Amino acid sequence: MPKNPSRWVEWITGDSTSPRVLERVRGLVDGRQCLVSLDSDHNADHVLDELEAYSPLIPRGCYLVVEDTAVDEYDLEPDLYPEGGPGVAVRRFLEQDKRFVPDRDCERFRLGMNPGGWLRRVA
């Protein structure tokens, strides 16, 4: 384990789909092995926009993690997400993009806040 693990994490604050933020992430990732975690507005339409924006940046074998898919899986706070939350977005995304598959091995104990949200790029 590195002495300073935070040197491997880059926190970026801003609208996740803004050109400024996307360019910053693109500059950091640019063909490198990475894990990108999406954890912003949990409404399905916004999460789907994020998935479409960030998926091209993820190299084969790496992960795009959608946080809090449990909102849909366990029907949490349905009033906050009348059109669905992150889990709905993941299902829609996977219907149209076959480069990614959910990696259930990342859900080792089958409990967590992002079931089905660990998306590994396979193609």
Image: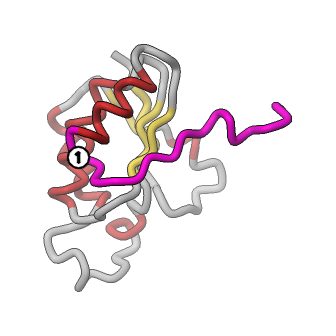
Residue 3 drawn in magenta: yes
x, y percent for residue 93? 21, 41
The reply, left or right, for residue 54 in relation to residue 112 is: left
Colouring of the image? secondary structure
Q: Please give the name of the residue rendered at 20% of the width and 60% of the height, measured from the top-left corner.
A: 44
Quadrant of the snapshot with the C terminus? top left
Image quarter of the N terminus: top right
The answer to whether residue 121 is left or right of residue 23 is right
Amino acid type of disc 1?
Answer: Thr
Q: As rendered, which of 67 and 11 lies closer to the eye?
A: 11
Give 6 or 71, whichever is nearer the viewer: 6
Residue displayed at 42% across by 66% down: 70
- On the image, the x and y values in percent for residue 9 come to 60, 39
> Residue 28 location in percent, x, y?
45, 26
Count of numbered labels shown in the rendering: 1
Left or right: residue 106 versus residue 60 is right
Q: Is residue 20 above or below residue 100?
A: below
Magenta residues? 1-19
Magenta-colored segment: predominant secondary structure: loop
Which residue is denoted by mark 1 in the rendering? 17
